Amino acid sequence: MKSLIALLVGVVLSVTACGASDAATFSGPAKEIAVTIAGGAVTPPPGRIEVAKGQQVKISVTSDVADEAHVHGYDKSAALQPGAAASIEFVADQDGLFEVETHESGLQLFQLVVQ
Amino acid sequence: MFLAHGVGGRQDLPIPFAGAVAGAVIALLVSFAALGFLWREPRLAGIPSYVIRSSARIPQIIGLVVAAYFSIGLLFGPDTPENPTAGVFYVLFWVGLVPLSLVFGPVWRNFNPLRTLHRVACALLRRDPNQGWKQLSPRVGYWPATIGLLAFVWLELVAPARATLPVISIWLSLYALTTLTGAAIYGASWFDKGDAFEAYSTLIGSLSVAGFLPPTHPLGRSRSATPTNTRSTQKRNNRTTTPNDSPTAIPATSGKKDRPRRSIPNGTPSAISAASGKKDGSRASAPSGSSPAVPAASGKKDGSRASAPSGSSPAVSAASGKRGGTRATVPVGSRPDKQRVSHDDAREARKQSSDQSSAATGKLIWRNPLDGMAGLAHAPGLPALVIVLLGSTMYDSLSNAPIWVRFVQDSSLPAPVMGTFGLLVVIGLVLALFLAATTWAGRLGGSSPATTAGELAHSLVPIAVGYLIAHYFSLFLFEGQHTLALLSDPLDTGANWLGTANWTLQSLGATPASIAMLQVTVIVIGHVLGTVLAHDRALTLFPRRTAVLGQIPLMTLMVIYTVAGLLLLFAG
């Protein structure tokens, strides 16, 4: 499944690029999302987090084991070292729903809803 | 768990979610009420899907060539996201069969490379491909395809590493092995209801507006006779469709009546001749059993019943079967509640004869999709097949919901175990609801539960197709393009064999809002069509007095399915 999703990476990106005439110019504060992984459990539990199109997103992931966090669609990833927070930052310029997962443990951290 | 869920979601709905649900429920209730008042006689003629078979070498060759091309990536390509194999299998093939079958009918059998391989192998061995070592019992029905479909949806939705080449290869090898073994034992007819993908294409293709008539049939002319929707069942109305093309089969003395509707192949001559005096009312307007002209001996009540193939009396079906029926596929009314056994026999005969008549090239006709759906041959396992299709699509929606993700990740069991559990539970719930509703309906309407479930299974097909479209539309649109681009370079060597490698994805006018709108629309249309099919069938299944009452459980079922489906798609 992971590779299938990986295979889908870029789809939404290109799709929304086509209809990006309404390029949002969101000028609010950045959305900060912190996630902790311990013993295979994700805190806070996986859910949907909504951000505005064009908003800056800062994701901070702390894991107790080495892993890789990945934002599908935006194709952003960060290596996770045990105990150290890793961060992923990007501008949410495509609308849609994007899964944020770890690659080794295959955990879903949350779903990012951009609209 | 496809990313495509992301394009369009509750947030993108141009109308409030509660409004969409309320609108869908109102649409169902209004159509139910309107049907009760306005649609008082069975109207659906049941036009089976005709498919050009053995004469069509071109689709077979296309099927083999495409399968061979697919195998390049599968066998020799790198196991990376750049390999098109997973996209071809899950998107272009599995999802693509939906639009292909909706437009052209149950066409997969024409392309099915396994069927072609079996045919070639039989030709080399100088065997008749239709002749197996053993006779396949009619009781088997769609059960092998149901099991195959369950195996496929488990692979698609649950199996670990399901987009990787080893997993796909293993699954496809097992599938090919079992299917070809079945064909070797039981002959080519194994594919009809034993091959999951052919059965899937048959279900969806029944909704196609395209059908094929055998070349001998006097089609087209019947169009002029369309509006014979009167109650004048006694009136002869064969002016337009006298099946004069097969003179031997039609005794002049038969009390035959032709009530053609569009290009319905109204009287199977062989069947007609066998059951002389049979009346041939393939259309609504013929109230069952109301015509004294029908000889009791033929066991044939003037049916007007939807999916009843002509020849619903034992004599008729036997006769048409033996003759190898050039067109035993003719739908003619029958009373399923009176003629259960013979009904199935007739269908079996129809099946066989349609297989045998396939050497000739059919003629394209246009039909009401509902007539096509009502013409889907009933067979054991059909309800289970439809429910696996519907339930698995619902599970796919559920599996993307955060509540399910949390449930799986909090569990100490491995994700594939939880996924298998979830898939089976959702399918089981859909099945339980269906069985409860049909049992209740049968009780109210005065018909046995098993009969009711089997007879109403076809009404779930438009619902399942609605879900499939709603669920997979954006995936097919976008990932399909992506896969086509990857297909130019299956070995990931920078090649551009098909000239599609540099495609950029086009939105083709689809926006999250328009996709969401489409999703609601197709789900509602699917359920309304299902309601119409169930209503029409209930009119023949139940006595007139209880027909409307008997449908209340079915209506309840449709409302539950609609609300559940919309909730899963948008609120998940």
Image (cartoon, rainbow, N blue to C red):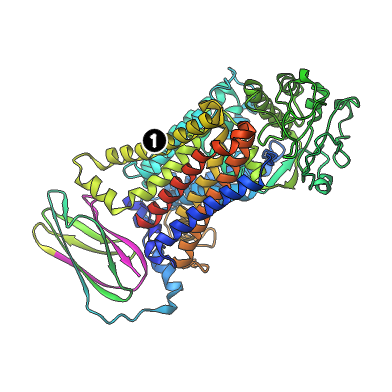
How many marks can you see? 1
Question: Label 1 lies in what chain?
Answer: B
Task: Tell me if I can see residue B153 in this picture.
Answer: yes
Pointer 1 residue: B428
Residue A106 lies, in percent from the top left, at 24, 50
Left or right of B117, for residue B365: right
Q: Amino acid at mark 1?
A: Gly
Frontmost residue, B133 versus B369: B369
Region rendered in magenta: A86-115
Place of residue B36 in the rendered image (x, y in percent of width and height, measured from the top left): 61, 45
In the displayed structure image, the side of residue B371 where residue B496 appears, left or right: left
Q: Is residue B82 magenta?
A: no
Vertical placement of residue B326 versus B102, above or below? above
Counting from the top left corner in percent of width and height, residue B406 is at 23, 50
Residue B301 horizontal/vertical position (percent): 73, 26
Secondary structure, mark 1, is: helix
